[in-house]
Amino acid sequence: MYKKGLTLMSDTVDYEQSLKLFIVLSRAYKSMNEMSNRFIQQQGLNPTEFAVLELLYHKGKQPLQKIGGKILLASGSITYVVDKLEKKGLIKRIASPQDRRVTYAETTEEGNSFMAEIFPNHEKNLHGMMSVLSSEEQGQAIELLKKLGLSIRDLSY
């Protein structure tokens, strides 16, 4: 409901509530991300290196061309990150025997050992951050955030 370019009170409340939710979500994500990144950096990795290593550790070997989409990283950056992890001895490249256009990345034994050592602490840190919410509240948050994320895909501006 609009009147001469002004928003009536009922619309203002909805806009203010949505803006407040956006700010609270953004600040919560920023705080959690900063704490998580501190732990990752203490392990000698940057967050992107950790994301690639964690993907390979949990999902197994992956085509280089698909890694970016799975961890939300531009494909041009993948080569750089894979190079760095390869130099650290944590992953290796494997050429596809079926298609020479495809190269896979996979964790090395050293990479698997490294992740087996640090990942439980990463999980513990995340759990510690989330423990302010009960198990039921965490489930509700998961469902609400999924609902929000899926609905946004259908919006167009």
Image (cartoon, grey):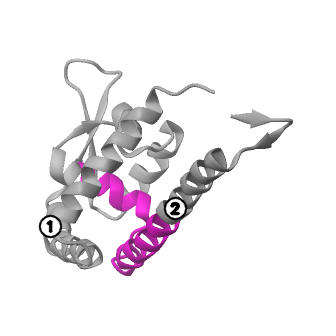
Residue 141 point in image, percent of width and height: 28, 57
Residues shaded magenta = 27-55
Q: Tag on residue 135?
A: 1
Relative side of 132 to 68, left or right: left
Q: Nearer the viewer, residue 112 or 142?
A: 142
Against 152, is 77 above or below? below
- Looking at the rendered structure, the secondary structure element under dot 1 is helix
Residue 26 point in image, percent of width and height: 52, 62
- Image quadrant occupied by the C terminus: top right
* Magenta span dominant secondary structure: helix
* Magenta-drawn stretch contains 45: yes
Q: Which of marks 1 and 2 is in front?
A: 1
Query: Are there few (<14), some (14-19), or many (20+) residues within 10 Å of tag 2?
Result: few
- Image quadrant occupied by the N terminus: top right
Q: Which residue is drawn at 19% across and 66% down?
A: 115
- Looking at the rendered structure, the secondary structure element under dot 2 is helix
Q: Which of 133 and 126 is in front in this view?
A: 133
Q: Residue at x 44, y 53 (%)?
A: 81
Is residue 107 visible in the rendered structure shown here? no
Against 84, is 10 above or below? above
Against 152, is 50 above or below? below
Q: Which amino acid does label 1 sit on?
A: Ser
State the count of labels: 2
Q: Nearer the viewer, residue 25 or 94?
A: 25
Q: Which of marks 1 and 2 is nearer the N terminus?
A: 2
| Mark 2 lies on residue | 26
* Magenta-drawn stretch contains 7: no
